[in-house]
Image: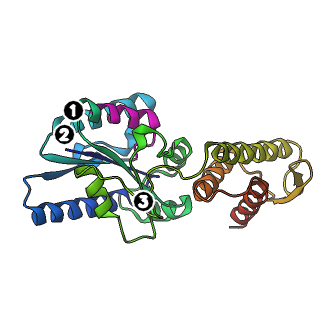
């Protein structure tokens, strides 16, 4: 039976969502009288420490443990939920291959939450991520893209939504029904490849311009995009990881909206300025 990956930033609420999904599936199993079971795999159940993500060697071992657990549990009568960041697309591809190898359905649930919200959750969590490790994992996070076969079907669950779109997940994973995109459930981006390319390219260009300007000037009003737009930079230089995190957030928020090409840069600059002020 299906393998469902839970992905998202550290402290985004992935385990909460995983348990909501598990409860929903078990309720459906009881209603339908099927002989299915639901298993949740996470680092806690495997006895894996957060410290294992500090070094590539130990992280590789951690991923090996997670894949081994998936292999042990995936069967025709078991729905497996991997409650993990699964933040590397190569790892998701590897898990997709494992699901394909045993001829079972597969899906990805992306728990979407802004970085500042995740930081707030992390600060009050009894088993919190260290600040430096939290920042490193956010920076390395490779967001799922429903256009990729290893990220599809993709279910996006905003952190502010109570609904997990359980029925759509159940139908897609158990009954192989085709999902209809909505705000909480997205199979594939409804926008063109050209738009996504422009969104990525133009936001990256602005980030590069800001980094170049900061080499000689720190803070103050600067001109960007050939002098067409202005941005008030903070006194303290903004680091590349911070700029890239903001860029990823903006891309995530707007990749389904199909902004006009002429609106991408001014809206991105406005987005940056608001984040600088916070």
Q: What residue did someone put label 3 on?
A: 185
Q: Identify the element where label 1 is drawn.
A: loop
Dot placed on the residue nearer the N-terminal end, 3 or 1: 1
Residue under pointer 2: 74
Give the image location of residue 225, x and y in percent.
86, 49
Give the color scheme: rainbow, by chain, secondary structure or one colour: rainbow
Look at the numbered disc 2 and give the secondary structure of its residue.
loop
- Return the x and y of residue 178 as percentages of the image width and height: 35, 52
| Label 2 Cα crowd, 10 Å radius (few <14 / some 14-19 / many 20+) | many
Q: Say which quadrant the N terminus sits in.
A: top left
Single out the mark in the foreground, 1 or 2.
1
Vertical order, 123 against 69 (above or below): below
**Is residue 152 shown to the viewer in this render?**
yes
- Dominant secondary structure of the magenta stretch? helix
Residue holding disc 1 = 102
Q: Secondary structure at mark 3?
A: loop
**Spatial CA span between label 2 and label 3:** 24 Å
Residue at image coords 76%, 58%: 263
Label 1 close to label 2 by CB (< 8 Å):
yes
Find out whether residue 23 is within the magenta segment: no
Q: Earlier in the sequence, mark 2 or mark 3?
A: 2
Of residue 98 and residue 189, the one placed in the foreground of this image is 189
Question: x and y percent of residue 252 in the render?
Answer: 57, 54
Range of magenta residues: 85-98
**Residue under the point 56% across and 44% down:** 139
Crowding at label 3, few (<14), some or many (≥20) Cα neighbours within 10 Å?
Answer: many
Q: Residue furthest right?
A: 227
- The reply to whether dot 2 and dot 3 touch (C-beta < 8 Å) is no
Residue 61 position by quadrant:
top left
Within 10 angstroms of label 1, few (less than 14), some, or many (20 or more) residues? some
Residue in front for this viewpoint, 18 or 258: 258
Where 225 falls versus 12 (above or below)?
above
């Amino acid at each position: 039976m299906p393998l469902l990956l839970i992905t998202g930033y550290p402290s985004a609420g992935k385990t909460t969502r995983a348990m909501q999904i598990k409860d929903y599936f078990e309720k459906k199993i009881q209603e339908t009288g099927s002989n299915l079971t639901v298993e949740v795999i996470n680092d806690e159940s495997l006895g894996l420490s957060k410290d294992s993500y500090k070094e590539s060697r130990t992280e590789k071992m951690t991923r090996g443990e997670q894949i081994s657990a998936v292999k042990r549990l995936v069967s025709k009568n078991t729905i497996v939920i991997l409650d993990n960041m699964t933040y590397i697309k190569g790892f998701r591809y590897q898990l997709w291959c494992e699901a394909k190898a045993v001829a079972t359905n597969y899906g990805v649930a992306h728990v979407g939450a802004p970085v500042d919200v995740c930081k707030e959750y992390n600060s009050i969590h009894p088993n919190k991520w260290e600040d430096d490790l939290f920042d490193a994992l956010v920076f390395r996070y490779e967001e799922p893209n429903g256009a990729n076969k290893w990220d599809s079907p993709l279910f996006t669950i905003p952190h502010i939504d109570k609904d997990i779109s359980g029925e759509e997940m159940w139908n897609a994973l158990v009954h192989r029904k085709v999902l209809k995109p909505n705000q909480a459930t997205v199979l594939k981006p409804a926008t063109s490849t050209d738009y996504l390319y422009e969104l990525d390219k133009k936001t990256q260009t602005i980030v590069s311009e800001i980094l170049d300007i900061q080499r000689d000037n720190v803070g103050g009003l600067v001109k960007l995009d050939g002098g067409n737009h202005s941005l008030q930079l903070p006194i303290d230089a903004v680091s590349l990881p911070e700029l890239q995190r903001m860029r990823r957030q903006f891309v995530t928020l707007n990749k389904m909206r199909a902004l006009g090409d002429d609106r991408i840069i001014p809206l991105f600059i406005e987005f940056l300025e608001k984040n600088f002020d916070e």
